[in-house]
Image (tube, helix red, strand yellow):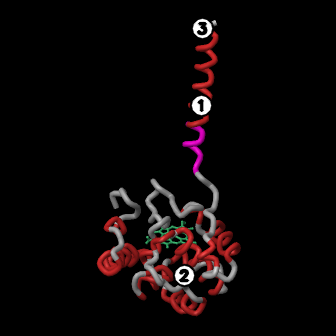
C-alpha cells in the first residue's frame, strides 16, 4: 500500500514536471492585448496588429521580443526612440519600415503606432504624439542603408539616454546582450 501511494505520487510529480517543461518550451504566441488608452492612437487597431504579424513578427516576434536572436528588442523599449524628431525619423527610415509593401502611409503609420504604443509598452516618453500618415510618407523617402544603420542607432540611443532618461541598455540590441 505504501509503495502504491509513493508510485502514484511519483507519477503525479513526473506529470507535473513534464507539464512544466512543456510550458517553458512553448513560446507565448499570443498577440498582446491593445490597452484601451492606446486604441485611439490608431485608425484601425486590428488591421495594425495583423499587418505587424504578417510583415514584422516573423523576425521580431508577436510580442516584439526575439531574444536570443541578435535583433533589437522592441518590447517595452522601442518607444524611447520617440525622444527627438530625428530618432522618430530613424524608426520610419529603417529599411524594413520605409520599404514596407504597405503603400498607404496611413496604414503604415497605424502599424508603427502599434509597435510603439502596444509592443513598446510604457517606453514612449510622456506626451509622445502618434505618427501620422503625412510624417510616414515624408520620412520613408529617406530610407537608411544597412551601412549607416548601426552607427545611427547608437548615436540616437545615446541621445535618448541623455535627453529622455532611457536606460543605458538601449545601446545594446537587448538588455544583457553583448552587442
Ligand atoms: C527579415 C527580418 C526583419 C523583418 C521582417 C523586420 N525587421 Fe525590423 N529589424 C530587423 C533587424 C536585423 C534590425 C536591426 C537593424 C537592421 O539591421 O535593420 C531591425 C530593426 C528594427 C527596429 C529598430 C529597433 C531599435 O531598437 O533600433 C524597429 C523599430 C523595427 N525593426 C521594426 C520593424 C517593423 C515595424 C517591421 C515590419 C514592417 C520589421 N521591423 C520587419 C529585422 C527585421
Residue 115 position in % (x across, y down): 55, 73
The answer to whether residue 123 of the structure is visible from this angle is yes
Residue to which mark 2 is pinned: 98
Residue at x 38% of width, y 60% of height: 175
Q: Is residue 124 above or below residue 105?
A: above
| Quadrant in which residue 54 is drawn | bottom right
The answer to whether the residue labelled 3 contacts the one labelled 2, judged by CB atoms less than 8 Å apart, is no
Residue to which mark 1 is pinned: 16
Q: CA distance from mark 3 to mark 1?
A: 21 Å
Q: Between residues 26 and 137, which one lies in front from this camera angle? A: 26
Q: Quick one: label 3 or label 2, which is nearer the N terminus?
A: 3
- Circle 3 — which element? helix
Q: CA distance from mark 2 to mark 1?
A: 48 Å
- Circle 2 — which element? helix
Q: Which label number is shown at residue 2?
A: 3
Residue 120 position in % (x across, y down): 50, 70
Residue at x 58% of width, y 89% of height: 132
Looking at the rendering, the stretch of residues picked out in magenta corresponds to 21-27
Residue at x 56% of width, y 60% of height: 61
Q: Quick one: label 2 or label 1, which is nearer the N terminus?
A: 1
Is 58 a magenta residue? no
Which quarter shows the N terminus?
Answer: top right
Residue 179 position in % (x across, y down): 34, 61
Amino acid at each position: 500500500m505504501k509503495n502504491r501511494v509513493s508510485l502514484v505520487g511519483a507519477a503525479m510529480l513526473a506529470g507535473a514536471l513534464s507539464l512544466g517543461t512543456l510550458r517553458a518550451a512553448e513560446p507565448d504566441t499570443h498577440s498582446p492585448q491593445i490597452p484601451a488608452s492606446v486604441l485611439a492612437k490608431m485608425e484601425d487597431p486590428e488591421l495594425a496588429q495583423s499587418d505587424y504579424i504578417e510583415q514584422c513578427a516573423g523576425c521580431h516576434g508577436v510580442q516584439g521580443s526575439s531574444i536570443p536572436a541578435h535583433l533589437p528588442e522592441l518590447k517595452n523599449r522601442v518607444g524611447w526612440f520617440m525622444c527627438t524628431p530625428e530618432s522618430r525619423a530613424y524608426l520610419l527610415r529603417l529599411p524594413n519600415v520605409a520599404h514596407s509593401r504597405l503603400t498607404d502611409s496611413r496604414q503604415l503609420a497605424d502599424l508603427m503606432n502599434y509597435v510603439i504604443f502596444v509592443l513598446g509598452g510604457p517606453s514612449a516618453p510622456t506626451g509622445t504624439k502618434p505618427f501620422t500618415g503625412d510624417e510616414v510618407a515624408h520620412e520613408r523617402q529617406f530610407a537608411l542603408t544597412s551601412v549607416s544603420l548601426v552607427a545611427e542607432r547608437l548615436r540616437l540611443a545615446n541621445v535618448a539616454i541623455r535627453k529622455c532618461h532611457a536606460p543605458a541598455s538601449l545601446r545594446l540590441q537587448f538588455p544583457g546582450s553583448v552587442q
